[in-house]
Image: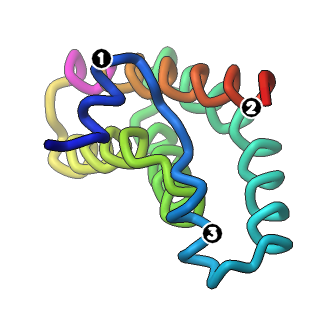
Amino acid sequence: MNSNKDDRERGKITIDRASTLQRLNGNQEVFNKILALFFSELPRLKNGLLAAGQQEDWEEVYQIAHKLHGSCCYIIVPPLKDELQVLCEQMRERKSIKNISRRIAIIIQMIDEILKQNERA
């Protein structure tokens, strides 16, 4: 069973803190710094992605999605990383704008959920 898919279907998008910490060789100090940087940049990247999508600036959408995807390689958020991967692939392959716009909306919702969880933490 795919727990990431199950979490996404339940509307639960979470940071995999254990895997992230493991990737950082258990270094809690580095984990805290990277996590703080992630959350400090996430609202700006979200707003940039939203604005670029609304302006149909597809190059900017790709650049922001690529940056977010890279961030999710350090701060592991499997469902968000998966959605960003698909968006980057769609952008490279010049898939339909309708699909890209829908994917952006899904990503924005996921980011909002992550930000809400951080506020509650």
* Amino acid type of the residue tagged 3 in the rendering: Leu
Question: As displayed, is residue 23 above or below residue 80?
Answer: below
Mark 3 vs 2: CB contact within 8 A? no
Q: Which of marks 2 and 1 is in front?
A: 2
* Circle 1: element type: helix
Which residue, as the protein is rendered here, is positioned at the far bottom?
25
The residue segment tinted magenta is 97-101
Mark 2 vs 1: CB contact within 8 A? no
Residue 12 among those drawn in magenta: no
Q: Which callout, 2 or 1, points at the residue further toward the start of the chain?
A: 1
* Amino acid type of the residue tagged 1 in the rendering: Arg
Query: Taken as a whole, is the magenta stretch helix, strand or loop?
Result: helix
State which quarter of the image contains the N terminus: top left
Residue 112: image tag: none
Residue in front for this viewpoint, 1 or 89: 1
Q: Which callout, 3 or 1, points at the residue further toward the start of the chain?
A: 3
The Cα–Cα distance between marks 2 and 1, rounded to whole angstroms, is 25 Å
Query: Is residue 118 something one can see in this rendering?
Result: yes
Q: Mark 1 points at which residue?
A: 102
Residue in front for this viewpoint, 1 or 95: 1
* Crowdedness near tag 3: few (<14), some (14–19) or many (≥20) residues, C-alpha within 10 Å: some
Count every numbered label the image shows and give the total: 3
Answer left or right for 42 relative to 7.
Answer: right
Image point (15%, 48%), residue name? 93
Answer left or right for 37 relative to 69.
Answer: right
Residue 118: image tag: 2
